[in-house]
Image: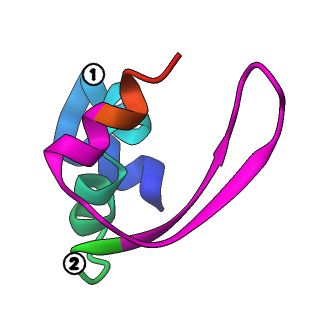
Amino acid sequence: DLIAAAKKRFGRLWEKRLREDIAEVLVAAGLPDSDRVDLELKNPSSGKVEHFPEVEMTRENRNKIKNTP
């Protein structure tokens, strides 16, 4: 359902949006909008998975994740 919603809303950019803007894809799929999410992030170097509950979805937090080596 998420892929179908992403394709419908974002066209040929659906994969990028699914990877980078999952919140927008969830809204496009008709799921409730929220300003906080629970995250599980895997460190690509160590393989360690960390859990971050109730993280505020802000551009600043998104950029922190994207720019982390």
Mark number, residue 12 = 1
Q: Say if 9 sits above or below 56 in the image.
A: above
Nearer-the-camera pick, 6 or 54: 54
Q: Residues within 10 Å of mark 2 (few under 14, many from 20)?
A: few
Nearer mark to the viewer, of 1 and 2: 2
Residue linked to disc 2? 33
Question: SS for tag 1?
Answer: helix
Residue 24, x across and y down, in percent: 22, 55
Nearer-the-camera pick, 39 or 26: 39
Q: Residues within 10 Å of mark 1 (few under 14, many from 20)?
A: few
Q: What's the amino acid at mark 1?
A: Arg
Q: Quadrant of residue 35?
A: bottom left
53 is within the stretch colored magenta: yes
Q: Say if 2 sits above or below 60 in the image.
A: below
Q: Residue at x 33, y 34 (%)?
A: 64
Q: Say if 26 sits above or below 4 in the image.
A: below
Q: Quadrant of residue 46?
A: top right
Residue 28 appears in the rendering = yes
Lower sequence index among marks 1 and 2: 1
Residue 15 appears in the rendering = no
Q: Quadrant of residue 44?
A: top right
48 is within the stretch colored magenta: yes
Q: Residue at x 27, y 24 (%)?
A: 13
Residue 16, x across and y down, in percent: 35, 26
Nearer-the-camera pick, 30 or 34: 34
Name of the residue lying farthest toward the bottom: 32
Question: SS for tag 2?
Answer: loop
Q: Give the residues in magenta.
A: 37-63
